[in-house]
Image: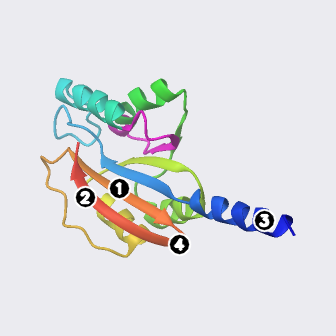
Amino acid sequence: MKIIPLLLLSLVMLSCGSTHYCYVVRHADKLDNTPYSVLSSAGHARSIVLKNYLTDKKIDIIFATPFQRTQETAQPLAQALNRSLLLYRNNAVDSIVTMIRSIKKKNILLVGHSGNIPSIIEGLTTKKIRPIAEGEYDNLYIIKTRKSKTELVATKY
């Protein structure tokens, strides 16, 4: 008879641990408006602020696009956590949404672009966000998933 309470306790404990987070940010400040621009000095400073904000969030997986500026944004956190960057195609929104949805019990950072982040957010949460302006680099979207339910918090970092 002592086994049943232990089994119930185990199930409760397992269900409590099923909450995970996906943090979505646009790359940090660009040096210029050319298509393959790298980060400016302000962008590198912002990537350190992002690292400091997320260091204790138990990030397991970090996604960036093939563009150098997204990788430069994610790299300080990746180095601090000894994680590799996983690259996704910035125009493959459906694929990255499917990938993120399939990942359970892992916290994720996804670094994207102003053009793909609204579609990624909508794909993950069904909620629409406003377009990201060209000069906006400090938006942080936090998607909390628990038992297939998602919550979206839009904040700044």
* Residue type pointed to by label 3: Leu
Give the residue type that dot 4 points to.
Ser
Sequence-wise first label, 2 or 3:
3
How packed mark 4 is, by other alpha carbons closer than 10 Å (few <14, some 14-19, many 20 or more), is few
Q: Whole-percent x and y of residue 33?
A: 16, 41
Question: Is residue 8 visible from the viewing direction of this image?
Answer: yes
Task: Please give the name of the residue rendered at 14% of the width and 55% of the height, measured from the top-left corner.
Answer: 133
Q: Give the camera-side residue of 123 and 116.
A: 123
* Residue at the spot of label 2: 154
Q: Which amino acid, by three-letter code, is at mark 2?
A: Ala
* Residue range highlighted in magenta: 54-70
Q: Nearer the viewer, mark 4 or mark 3?
A: 3
Does residue 21 show up magenta in the picture? no
The residue identified by callout 1 is 142
Separation of residues labelled 2 and 3 (CA atoms): 38 Å
Give 39 or 57, whichever is nearer the viewer: 57
Residue under numbered circle 4: 148
Say if 3 sits above or below 109 in the image: below
Q: Is residue 38 visible?
A: no
